[in-house]
Image (cartoon, rainbow, N blue to C red):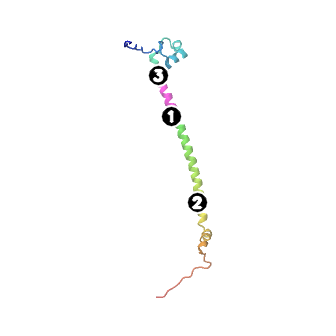
């Protein structure tokens, strides 16, 4: 029977294969060759202004995106209003047409109600 042993703990920054772990930052450092551009390290005095400018750029992009989204919503709402306005105009015209005396007379003819051809007569009662 074999004996129990402790596993060896991995050091931070090392992969299980034994070499240094590759992260996105090490990949960027290799591809961009940051040490050639900045020297041995990033000057700390440049970090706050660069971070501030990055924040402003992200805020600008977000604001622009929201504005374009709002413009699309407004245009969609305007198109819906135009469609509804056209429907209302059509319905009003149909209502006005159907409420004309000649149209009403045609519709009530099926109930044997006809239009009077002579003026009404006033009946006077004496007390």
- Farthest front residue in view: 1
In front: label 1 or label 3: 1
Dominant secondary structure (helix, strand or loop) of the stretch shown in magenta: helix
- What is the magenta range? 50-62
Give the labeled residue for mark 2.
92
- Between discs 2 and 3, the one toward the N terminus: 3
Q: Is residue 60 magenta?
A: yes
Gap between marks 1 and 3, in whole Å?
A: 21 Å
Q: Which residue is mark 1?
A: 63
Comparing labels 2 and 1, the label whose residue is closer to the camera: 2
Q: Residue at x 55, y 40 (%)?
A: 71
Residue 112 located left or right of residue 6: right
x 56%, y 47%: residue: 78
Precedes in sequence: disc 1 or disc 3: 3
Instruction: Indicate whether residue 111 is drawn in magenta.
Output: no
Q: Compared with residue 8, is residue 100 higher up or lower down, i.e. above or below?
A: below
Q: Nearer the viewer, mark 2 or mark 3?
A: 2
Q: Residue at x 47, y 27 (%)?
A: 55
SS state under label 2 = helix
Q: What SS does tag 3 mark?
A: helix
Query: Residue 81 placed where, x, y %?
Result: 56, 50
Residue 28 image position (x, y, % from top left): 52, 18
Identify the residue at image location x=51%, y=31%: 60
Residue matched to label 3: 49
């Amino acid at each position: 029977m074999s004996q129990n042993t402790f596993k060896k703990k991995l050091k931070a920054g090392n992969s299980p294969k034994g070499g240094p772990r590759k992260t996105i930052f090490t990949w960027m450092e290799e591809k961009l060759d940051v040490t050639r551009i900045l020297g041995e390290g990033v000057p700390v005095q440049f970090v706050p202004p660069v971070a501030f400018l990055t924040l402003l750029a992200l805020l600008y992009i977000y604001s622009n995106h929201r504005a374009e989204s709002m413009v699309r919503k407004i245009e969609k709402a305007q198109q819906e209003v135009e469609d509804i306005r056209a429907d209302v105009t059509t319905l009003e015209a149909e209502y006005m047409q159907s409420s004309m005396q000649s149209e009403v007379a045609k519709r009530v003819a099926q109930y044997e109600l006809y239009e009077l051809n002579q003026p009404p007569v006033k009946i006077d009662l004496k007390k």
